[in-house]
Image (tube, helix red, strand yellow):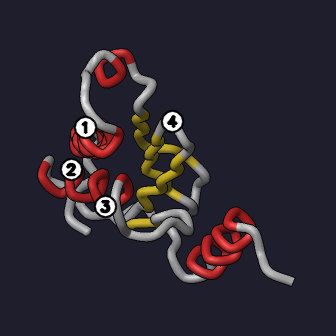
């Protein structure tokens, strides 16, 4: 029987998470994408702590007009700026089972522009 889109994404996510793990020296940038919003957080998986987070629901970002792809780039810049303040420069990128395309790619490029190294 064929898998639904969500079941397929969860399988890919689990496969990637076996390999990609955030440490204190190199935390993980995790992305979640819903139909309307996009969320990003930088996580240290060893201690189970979220170092920084940003989403398209934040007040400064939600007031910005533009396409969902442009908003995703703003979210990437916001999470990168918060991470740099917390002392994080290099991360491992966890696309959450989504294709590296569109909003996910835009978020990653926004984080790179703001100074994060993948």
Which is more foreground, mark 1 or mark 4?
A: 4
- Callouts 2 and 1 close, C-beta under 8 Å: yes
User: Residue at (25%, 44%) from the top-left corner?
Assistant: 73
Disc 2 residue crowd, few under 14, some 14–19, many 20+, Cα 10 Å = many
Q: Secondary structure at mark 1?
A: helix
Q: Which mark is residue 105?
A: 3
Q: CA distance from mark 4 to mark 2?
A: 19 Å
Q: Which mark is residue 36?
A: 4
Question: Reading the chain from its start, which is encountered first: label 3 or label 1?
Answer: 1
Q: CA distance from mark 3 to mark 4?
A: 16 Å
Residue 63 visible at all: yes
Q: Residue furthest right?
A: 1
User: Residue at (23%, 51%) from the top-left corner?
Assistant: 111
Question: Reading the chain from its start, which is encountered first: label 3 or label 4?
Answer: 4
Residue 22 visible at all: no
Q: CA distance from mark 2 to mark 1?
A: 7 Å
Rendered-image quadrant of the N terminus: bottom right
Residue occupied by mark 2: 110
Q: CA distance from mark 1 to mark 4?
A: 15 Å
Question: Reading the chain from its start, which is encountered first: label 4 or label 2?
Answer: 4
- Callouts 3 and 4 close, C-beta under 8 Å: no
Residue occupied by mark 1: 74
């Amino acid at each position: 029987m064929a898998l639904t889109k969500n079941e397929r994404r969860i399988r890919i996510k689990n496969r990637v998470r076996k390999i990609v793990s955030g440490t204190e020296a190199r935390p993980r940038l995790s992305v979640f994408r819903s139909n309307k919003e996009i969320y990003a957080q930088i996580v240290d998986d060893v201690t189970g702590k979220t170092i920084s987070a940003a989403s398209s629901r934040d007040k400064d970002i939600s007031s910005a007009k533009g396409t969902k792809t442009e908003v995703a780039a703003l979210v990437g810049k916001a999470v990168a700026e918060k991470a740099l303040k917390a002392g994080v420069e290099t991360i491992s990128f966890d696309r959450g089972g989504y294709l590296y395309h569109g909003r996910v790619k835009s978020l990653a490029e926004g984080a790179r522009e703001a100074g994060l190294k993948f």
